């Protein structure tokens, strides 16, 4: 669980930017998007194989 403590005199917008950056670095948003819909195991393997070939 990521959290950001708002400092004295810090604006909400600045704290929100820090929070978004933390979420991005932790990969939480990407994980949530990935889990949004069920993906069959065969489709998951196919996607991973395509990603591996792309590199």
Image: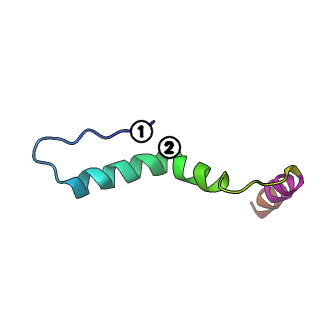
35 to the left or right of 46: left
Residue 13 screen position, x and y as percent: 24, 58
Of 36 and 50, which appears nearest the observer?
A: 36
Of the numbered discs 2 and 1, the one sitting upstream in the chain is 1
The span from disc 2 to disc 1 (Cα, nearest Å) is 8 Å
Residue 50 screen position, x and y as percent: 82, 61
Task: Using the image, tell me which numbered label, if any, was put on residue 38.
Answer: none
| Principal secondary structure, stretch drawn in magenta | helix
Of tags 2 and 1, the one toward the viewer is 1
Task: Using the image, tell me which numbered label, if any, was put on residue 26.
Answer: 2
| Range of residues picked out in magenta | 42-49
Please, which residue is most extreme toward the right here?
A: 42
Q: Which residue is mark 1?
A: 2
Instruction: Say which residue appears at 61% left-offset and 49% top-offset.
Output: 31
Residue 55 screen position, x and y as percent: 74, 60
In which image quadrant can residue 36 be found? bottom right
43 to the left or right of 10: right
Residue 9 lies, with reference to residue 43, above or below; the image says: above
Report if the CB atoms under discs 2 and 1 are less than 8 Å apart.
yes
Please, which residue is most extreme toward the left here?
A: 9
Q: Is residue 26 magenta?
A: no
24 to the left or right of 33: left
Residue 54 screen position, x and y as percent: 77, 63
């Amino acid at each position: 669980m990521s959290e950001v403590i708002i400092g004295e005199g810090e604006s909400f917008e600045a704290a929100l930017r820090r929070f978004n950056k933390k979420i991005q670095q932790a990969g939480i948003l990407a994980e949530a998007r990935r889990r949004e819909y069920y993906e069959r195991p065969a489709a998951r393997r196919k996607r991973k194989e395509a990603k591996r070939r792309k590199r």
